[in-house]
Image (cartoon, helix red, strand yellow):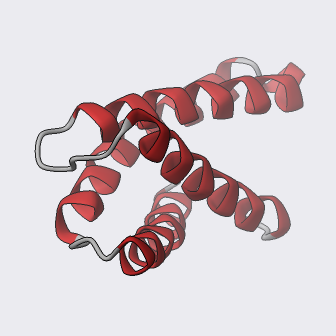
Amino acid sequence: MIYTLLLTLLVEGAVVFVYCAVQKRPAGVLLQASFIVNMFTQSMLWIVLRFFFRHYLIALITAEVLIWLVESAFMYKLPGNKLSLSHAAFLSLCMNLSSFGVGWFLPV
C-alpha cells in the first residue's frame, strides 16, 4: 500500500510539474494540494477495493471516478491554487489517468 501511494505521488507530482510549466504557474501550492488529497483518496481507494474485492473492476472504476471528482473539488477550493473549476477538473483527470495507467500496467 505504501508503494502504491509513493508511486501515485510521484506520477501525479510529475503531471502537476508539467501542468505548471505549461501554464506558467508556481508548482508548490498545487504539489501540496496533490499530496494532501492523495493521502485521503488513496486510503479511500484501498478501503473500497478491500470491501468490494469480488467486484474489483466495477469498484475500481467507480472509486476512480469519485476520486477524480473529490480531487477536482479539492484542487478548485483550496486557497492559493487559483484554478478555475474546469482547470482543476482537467488537472485532476490528467493526474488520475496517469497514475491509473501506470498502476494498471505495473505489478503493484
The answer to whether 80 appears left or right of 15 in the picture is: left
The answer to whether 80 appears left or right of 47 in the picture is: left
Name the residue at 54% across, 71% down: 11
Q: Quadrant of residue 74?
A: top left
The answer to whether 58 appears left or right of 77 in the picture is: right
Above or below, 107 against 74 in this view is below
Name the residue at 59% across, 24% down: 66
The answer to whether 31 appears left or right of 21 in the picture is: left
**Which of the two residues, 91 or 42, is positioned nearer the viewer here?**
91
Name the residue at 81% across, 59% down: 104
Which quarter of the rendered picture does the C terminus lie within? bottom right
The image position of residue 29, as x and y in percent, is: 18, 60
The image position of residue 53, as x and y in percent, is: 79, 26
The image position of residue 50, as x and y in percent, is: 66, 28
Q: Residue furthest left?
A: 80
**Which of the two residues, 61 or 43, is positioned nearer the viewer here?**
61
Q: Quadrant of residue 62?
A: top right
The image position of residue 60, as x and y in percent, is: 75, 32
Name the residue at 21% across, 47% down: 82
**Which of the two residues, 25 or 9, is positioned nearer the viewer here?**
25
